[in-house]
Image: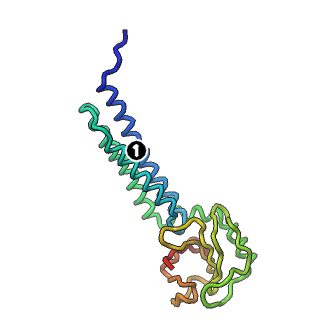
Amino acid sequence: MTTPPGPGAASAERECFRAAGVVVLGGAAAAVLLWASTFPGWPVVAGVVLSILVVAGLLVVLGEEPVPAARRLRPVGLVVALVLAIGGAISVENSSHAALQIRFEASRSDFETVVAAAGAPTSRDGRSDFPGTCPSRIGSYALGTCEAIDRGYLLLQQRAALGDDAGFAYLPDGLPSEDPTASGGLQRDQFSHLSGPWYGWSCGC
């Protein structure tokens, strides 16, 4: 007759699942950070998901005390999870918008079709109506609105950014002048170059 596992073995098994769960949560956090970095502005939904993952991680880590034989599993899982999450954050921070550039390039031809139909941008003061049709989606990005600024176009991302407006800018003559009025309230340092005449932008304006 096989002897059933004692409570200590069952607790050790639960700790293995807890440790694995913490690692999975850390990997999920890194994946969310990477996904969020493919937008010009940090999506609100990314902040919500990360908050949920943090709470879930705390619930897992602060669960019932394990038996002595399994006491090291949870800290090990936590360390691995933190390495994944922090490593993901550092990679995103040091990537110089690489993830955004890669995703944008896959949709660039669709963006160029939209601005070509609108015609060449002209000189104007501040933001005004977009002269073409503003689609609800361009490539893999959902759009909110499209606007014209001095010698360029702004395409606002639909997925709300935390505390900011954000989107893409078509600036065939390069960055706007130092006068933020002409560029719809945007400063030159709020643009990040993607490729050619295309820029990402984010501001609290």
User: Could you tell me residue 9's position as x and y percent?
Assistant: 32, 26
Residue 200 picture quarter = bottom right
Quarter holding residue 91: bottom left
Q: Secondary structure at mark 1?
A: helix
Which residue, as the protein is rendered here, is positioned at the far top?
Answer: 1
Residue 21 placement, left or right of 193: left
Q: Residue at x 43, y 56 (%)?
A: 51
Considering every residue shown, the one lying at the far right of the view is: 117
Q: Is residue 85 visible?
A: yes
Residue highlighted by disc 1: 23
Q: Where is residue 17 drawn, in percent x and y?
A: 39, 36
Is 76 above or below relative to 3? below
Where in the figure is residue 23, as x and y percent of width and height? Answer: 40, 44
Amino acid, disc 1: Val
Local packing at callout 1 (Cα closer than 10 Å; few below 14, some 14-19, many 20+) is many
Image point 53% across, 82% down: which residue?
A: 186
> Does 114 sit left or right of 31 as displayed?
right
- Quadrant assignment, res 176: bottom right
Q: Quadrant of the N terminus?
A: top left
| Residue 192 in view | no
What's the coloring here? rainbow
User: In screen coordinates, is 5 left or right of 136?
Assistant: left
